[in-house]
Image (spheres, rainbow, N blue to C red):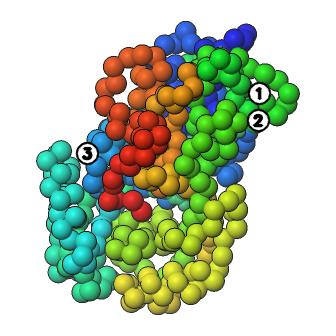
Amino acid sequence: MNQPYDILIIGGGVIGSASAYSLMKKDPGLRLAVIEKDPSYSHASSTLSMANIRLQFSLKENIQISQYAMDALDRFSEDMAVGDERPDVGFHHEGNLFLYGEKEEPAARDSLKLQQSLGCPVRWWTPDQVREAYPLYDASPYVGATFCGRDGFIDAYSMLMGYRQKARSLGARYITDEVTAIDKDSGRVTGVRLASGERLTAAVVLNCAGAWAAEVAKTAGVRLPVIPTKRQVFAMDPAKKSDRPLPLTILPSGFYFRTETGGLILMGWSLPEDPVGFDFSWDRERYMDLMWPTLAEFVPSFDTAKLMRGWAGLYADNTLDHNAILGPWPELKGLFLANGFSGHGLQQAPAVGRYMAERILGLTPTLDLSIFTPDRILENRPVSEDGIV
Ligand SMILES: Cc1cc2nc3c(=O)[nH]c(=O)nc-3n(C[C@H](O)[C@H](O)[C@H](O)COP(=O)(O)OP(=O)(O)OC[C@H]3O[C@@H](n4cnc5c(N)ncnc54)[C@H](O)[C@@H]3O)c2cc1C
């Protein structure tokens, strides 16, 4: 494909690939390249996530984004088919269960009202209802819970590959290289420079570099409040297993766990002391000293279990408000951002891909996500979401 390109996308994770797919679908004539430094995606958040999809957010737009994700994932095999290949994201609708203490109850009831008004099948459960559904749980310290059986988890790798292969089949070019700088001239972007020494030119550059987004933006003099924060996940094998899959269960402290296929239990906890940096090591002591005791208090029968493995991935943590940053950067023409997803970007990929394509192509957005405008960074105007995990 000859230069110049129309659009360059930095980062071919789930956000970059969903954006590439939506752009090519809307305008098959585009000259578009996605630059991805690691096509094995070994450190990408997309492949290291818990892969949970949920309707239980407190902000209308975040709920609508997930509603669209549910629909898009139901149609995914069909929409992403390339020849005879049909990706299967294997949506496990095991549900999400959020537990609340007295302090959290009023905000939880407000969110529930909003979710129900938008047609989400979320219900309030008393501690007795929690026990009835999941007899292993000790829900007695809590005043109640919200449950949504439509929520669940998917195979994130299949989702990423589905978008990537479909985008390629529609004409997007994937280049294995690292963007070392965004080039600009007279207040607008002109392309990117690569580690290989090559220069690519385009009037539009979309930053989808995940946890590396601020580093990439800085090369164009743009400061983003996005930091790479390490989050750890542990998989353990309990001696006594639940006779039914356990939903993603989130305690008010932020500790969460769910059943993984094969009866393992996956768990995580975003903690304020989690280190910032590109560190992917995981730490057994955190499991022994913190995670396991917390889990065993809520599920007493899990007091005998074996740690099987763990991993660490990075949240692209938006320190302003932990929500996505979507749209054009007001101070540099041609630079678009899809960054800062913190812990919920995987499920936002279908709606964000579509929105970024519509914004870049100058179309009216199907779903108005202007609340997530990058302008709010310059104006120090955070957007509030209670459902950050
Ligand atoms: C432990 C954990 C659990 C999570 N759980 C969930 C969950 O349950 N549900 C949910 O919705 N979200 C979850 N998330 C968040 C979710 O994974 C991310 O928000 C989402 O994957 C972001 O996708 P992305 O494409 O922006 O980033 P990534 O997947 O990280 O992709 C960015 C890509 O950019 C590439 N790149 C970076 N810099 C350059 C460069 N200079 N040149 C070329 N390429 C570059 C990287 O190699 C990478 O492949 C979780 C994240 C973690 C870490």
- Do tag 3 and tag 1 residues touch (Cβ < 8 Å)? no
Distance in Å between CA atoms under marks 2 and 3: 37 Å
The answer to whether marks 1 and 2 mark residues whose Cβ atoms lie closer than 8 Å is: yes
Q: Nearer the viewer, residue 379 or 66?
A: 379
Does residue 357 sit above or below 381 in this rendering? above
Mark on residue 60?
A: 3
**Which of the labelled discs sits on residue 193, or is there none?**
1
Label 2, secondary structure: give it. Answer: strand
Q: Is residue 322 depicted above or below 142 in this figure?
A: above
Query: Foreground residue, 130 or 140?
Result: 140
Q: For the C terminus, which image quadrant?
A: bottom left
Few, some or many residues within 10 Å of mark 1 (<14, 14–19, 20+): some
The residue sitting at the right extreme is 197
Q: Is mark 1 on a helix, strand or loop?
A: strand
The amino acid pointed to by label 2 is Thr
**Residue nearest the viewer, comparing 33 with 279:** 279
Label 3 element class = helix
Q: Name the residue tied to disc 2.
A: 180
Q: Residues within 10 Å of mark 3 (few under 14, many from 20)?
A: few
The kind of residue on which mark 3 rests is Lys
At horizontal 74% and vertical 20% (from top left) the residue drawn is 200
Decide which of 121, 105 is in the foreground and name it.
105
Q: Residue at x 31, y 82 (%)?
A: 137
| Other-residue count near label 2 (Cα within 10 Å), few / some / many at <14 / 14–19 / ≥20 | some
Q: Is 322 drawn above or below residue 238 in the view shown?
A: above
Residue 291 visible in the shown view: yes
Q: In this view, does 104 lie to the left or right of 288?
A: left
Mark-to-mark CA distance, 1 and 2: 6 Å
The numbered mark, 1 or 2, whose residue comes first in the sequence reads 2
Going 64% across and 28% down the picture, which residue do you hit? 34
Q: Residue 183 falls in which quadrant of the image? A: top right
Q: Position of residue 268 (x, y in %)?
A: 50, 70
